[in-house]
Image (cartoon, rainbow, N blue to C red):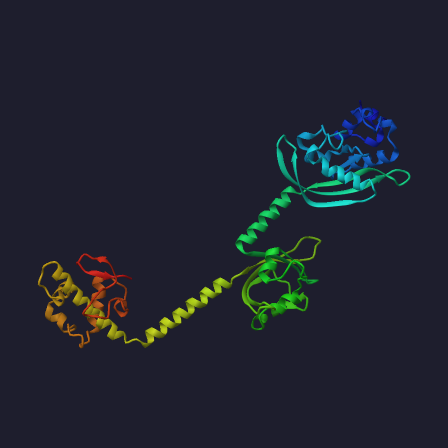
Amino acid sequence: MTEPEALSSYPFLGSGSETGELIRAYDWQKTSLGRLDQWPEYLRAAVSLILRSDVPMTIQWGREGYMLYNDAYREIAGARHPGLLGQTIHDSWSEIADFRAQVVDHVLKGNTLGYGNEHFVLERHGEPEDIWLDINYSPIVDETGTPAGVFAIVKNTTRRFQSEERLRIAQQAGGVGIFEVYPETGRLKVSDQYRRIWGLGADVAITVELLASLVHPDDRQVLAHQYSGLKYSGLTDRLAYAEYRRVDPVTGEIRWIARKGEVIATKGAAKRYVGIVMDITDRKKSEAALAESEARWRLLVAQMDIKEIRHRNVRVLVKELERNAGRDGKRTGGLTMLAGMLGKSAAQVSRFASEKPSTHIGDRIAREIEDVFEKEYGWMDHVQWSANLDDVEPGHAGPDSHGVNRPAR
């Protein structure tokens, strides 16, 4: 059939639509709709509407739900196209026949229905697959206003839903909440994880004022330069990184929050901030514990008699060298062994060291020992050895090339 013939034969079907041509060629006499020239005007108008739309649409006609659809719906139909055309509820998407039957029954009573991200398992390509759809159903009425069919607008939201689901899982696993703030109105859009970080339930209306009231009084100044009532006082390219505490209004628990964001400017739309928040309480506790430990260590070091520690460690080293010599069957004193290690005579070393615990050992000998052991400056300043000279059990990592058990670092 040529295009002029097609237009003159049932012009409501138009031309250029593959599905329109399939409807024109279909044997409708085997259905309750009858021949195309018998279709009522309201059915023709509805079919004409869907065929001229680039949005996926369907018509389920009568109680049987005979199916018509447009070209845009072919992506959703998959390999079931064109076999769905003219089929009843039970012969088209048989795997969800009960659901569709309930919809048709409800809408033919004059009602409308809407589903968002509704999950289905459909055999679009010969195997069951998960698909999520937004669907809006409404009645098609005859001249008397009586519902005669069901009109549906369908949108495949599978990719969007799966992306949002992956994002939700990533946010939850990583402890990251997402927010959008519209400075001109103060409106906020936040993720579920954002609510959890702030300790707010799903039914709580989140506003800038509410968040500001939950911030610790000492930290509110951090946000003061950005908030002014419900609006930002100035819109910069970035929402500066900030850390502040929030106080639970019921339990009084204090949690640390980190926040950062950027401005998103879309042509024709109001600018908005988009950013993330994280609960950094554990990190803050670790940093505080480390700072406290370092402070205690600095105080301890300040209170130490470093020279006494250094001298004691050298005496312990001399004692250990002597014991190692005894284990090897030698009768060499520890002072003599130390002198050999330093490349000096025992007389030279004895000027700076003594085996008597009551005698202090000079700083110079400690520095020369560090050079021999290839330790950084100040190694002898730390308590590396047992303080009991009569029972020396140094922490060590094993004997070195001189046969001396070095202290563990």
Q: Is residue 211 left or right of residue 363?
A: right
Q: Quadrant of residue 219 in the image?
A: bottom right
Q: Left of 189 or right of it: where is 396?
A: left
Q: Is residue 56 visible?
A: no
Quarter holding residue 294? bottom left
- Count numbered badges in the picture: 0
Q: Quadrant of residue 254?
A: bottom right
User: Toward the viewer: 182 or 137?
Assistant: 137
Q: Residue at x 72, y 37 (%)?
A: 98
Q: Residue at x 49, y 62 (%)?
A: 282
Q: Residue at x 67, y 58 (%)?
A: 271
**Residue 227 percent coordinates (x, y):** 64, 67
Q: Answer yes or no: is residue 332 visible.
A: yes
In the image: residue 2, left or right of residue 210: right
Q: Quadrant of the C terminus?
A: bottom left
Q: Position of residue 340 (x, y in %)?
A: 13, 63
Residue 308 placement (x, y as % from top left): 24, 75
* Residue sticking out furthest to the right: 144
List x then y, in percent, for residue 101.
75, 37
Nearer-the-camera pick, 98 or 134: 98
Quarter of the image with the N terminus is top right
